[in-house]
Amino acid sequence: MSKRGQLSGLPNSVIVLVIAAIFLVMGVIILGGIQETDIVAKSLSTSVANETVTPTGVAVSLNGASACKSVCTLGLINNDTNDIIITAGNYTFVNADCTIVNLTSEFPNAWNVTYSYTSGGEACDSANLTVGGLASFADFWEIIVLAVVITIVIGLLLVVFGGRRVR
Amino acid sequence: MRSVLKNKKGQLGQLAPAILTLIFAAIVLVFGLVMSQELRDTQTAGTEAYMAANDTITGLGTFADFWEIIVLAVVITVVIGLLLVVFGGRKVQ
């Protein structure tokens, strides 16, 4: 009878875990949605003139890339050595990442990049940390499940081998 | 036996409300920061009101650094609570 009692808690435990997991996922999705809204992710507009970078064959990030949810718009690129305008065919610019890749060997030295970007402010930074922090809950499901299983298994074993009645 | 089971259910039963509370608090925090940020931006940069609003946003924003610790505390509470039911050695009402 006691053993049955222990096992009878299993469906309830699983239901509670599933409901908790659904709450967590829904919550993180909602927070992610809030984070992507313009009022959070695009509250700031910044213009940058002549930022010096030396692009290579791999993507090089502009300073705007470090801002929260930044999206860059390229203005102009000049060669730092002789101020020649570098045309579009010589590079790849990724707006969402604020990165630039040098596609040719014609301009191997530093470039002066003029661009603008939209980004989020403090609310965006905090929203990022909040989503990350709450999502870290997901790392602990295995431990919680293990604790539930241990509780049920040990509880069952104690009922059989414990030697005393547990009320 | 029933009390043990009841207690165990109670321990695990805290999990879903705890997550809901965390999500609610997180949404309130983010919305609060957004509103504070918008209020701050209505002020002229450098004025007393702007500086105060800015400090407030920065201060409130530090709350976001502690979500992981809060989540860890919730998990520890639930897990230790569950294990204490079996290994605690005394009857827990």
Image (cartoon, rainbow, N blue to C red):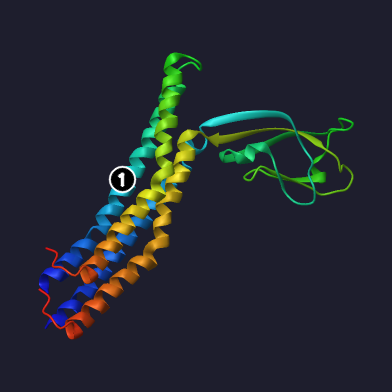
B43 over A11 or under it: above or below:
above
Q: Residue at x 31, y 45 (%)?
A: B24
Residue B81 horizontal/vertical position (percent): 25, 62
Residue A131 horizontal/vertical position (percent): 43, 48
Q: Residue at x 63, y 41 (%)?
A: A65
Residue A30 seen in render = no
Q: Nearer the viewer, residue B55 or B85?
A: B85
Q: Report in which chain the residue with disc 1 lies.
A: B
Q: Quadrant of the N terminus of chain B?
A: bottom left
Q: Residue at x 41, y 31 (%)?
A: B59
B41 over A114 or under it: above or below:
above
For residue A88, which quarter of the picture? top right
Secondary element at image label 1? helix
Q: Residue at x 58, y 39 (%)?
A: A70
Query: Looking at this rendering, what residue extends furthest in the top direction?
Result: B47
> Three-letter amino acid code at disc 1?
Phe
Residue A51 horizontal/vertical position (percent): 73, 32
Residue pointed to by mark 1: B24
Q: Nearer the viewer, residue A36 or B59?
A: B59
B47 over A128 or under it: above or below:
above
